[in-house]
Image (cartoon, grey):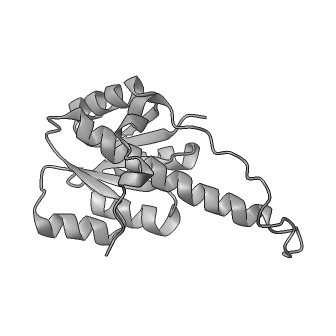
Amino acid sequence: MPTTILVVDDDTLIRKLVGAHLRAWGYEVATASGVEEALAVLGARHVHIVLTDIEMPGRDGYDLLRILRDQHPLIRAIVLTSHDEVSTVLDVLKLGAFSFVSKPILDPEILAQAVAQAEVVLRGWLDRLASVSRRRKPSGTTAVEPHAAQTPVPESPGPLTDFLLPTDQLVPLP
C-alpha cells in the first residue's frame, strides 16, 4: 500500500503542483483547501503524512497541527510556509510538525527529502508498534519471543529512497 499524503493549502496552484510531484514520486495524494476539508479527508481515509500551509482563511495550519498532535499522533506533518522566520519554525515544531519547507518551493528535491525523512520516521514507529503488538497475547501477556521474525513493512514507493543517507554516514546526536 503506497504512502498517502494529504496536501492542505488554500492556494489551488500549490495543491496542484505539490500533488503532481508527489504522484510522480509514487505517492497517493489527497488535497484540501483548508482545515475543515482536511478533517473530512482524515475522517474518510487513512493518511500517513500531511503537508500543510500555515496561513489559510478560517482555521489555520496551527489549528491543524494541534489537531494532528492530539488526535492523530502517528501522522507526520510537514509545514509549507512562506514565513520561515525562526519564531514561526519554532512554533510549528513545538506543535509537533516534523519539518518545514519554505515556499515558494524552488527545488522539488527539498520537498522530496522532507517527505522521505518523514516516511522513514513513520515506518520506524509503525515497526515498533507492530513489534509490541506481536509480543502481546490477547490477555496482555508476552506471546512472542524477542528474537522472533518481524512482519516486514512495505518498502517506500518511488525514487525517494535515493535521498536517504546510508547508516554508516549518520552522525549521532550530541
The relative height of residue 74 versus residue 22 in the rendered view (above or below) is below
Q: Residue furthest front?
A: 168
Towards the viewer: 141 or 77: 141
Q: How many marks?
A: 0
Quarter of the picture containing the C terminus is bottom left
- Residue 3 seen in the figure: yes
Identify the image quadrant of residue 15.
top left
Q: Quadrant of residue 143?
A: bottom right
- For the residue pair 170 and 60, the one nearer the viewer reads as 170
Residue 157 point in image, percent of width and height: 50, 32
In the rendered image, the vertical position of residue 78 relative to residue 16, given as above or below: below
Q: Nearer the viewer, residue 107 or 41?
A: 107
In the image, taking residue 145 as reference, residue 100 lies left or right, namely left
> What residue is drawn where x is 23% and y is 70%?
91
Residue 153 position in % (x across, y down): 63, 45
Viewer can see residue 59: no
Q: Residue at x 17, y 65 (%)?
A: 88
- What residue is at 62 percent from the left and 39 percent from the top? 154
User: Quadrant of the rendered structure where residue 86 is?
Assistant: bottom left
Q: Is residue 95 left or right of residue 67?
A: left
Q: Position of residue 173 (x, y in %)?
A: 34, 71
Q: What x and y, as percent, mark residue 60?
A: 27, 57
Residue, x 69% and y 58% (percent of image)? 130
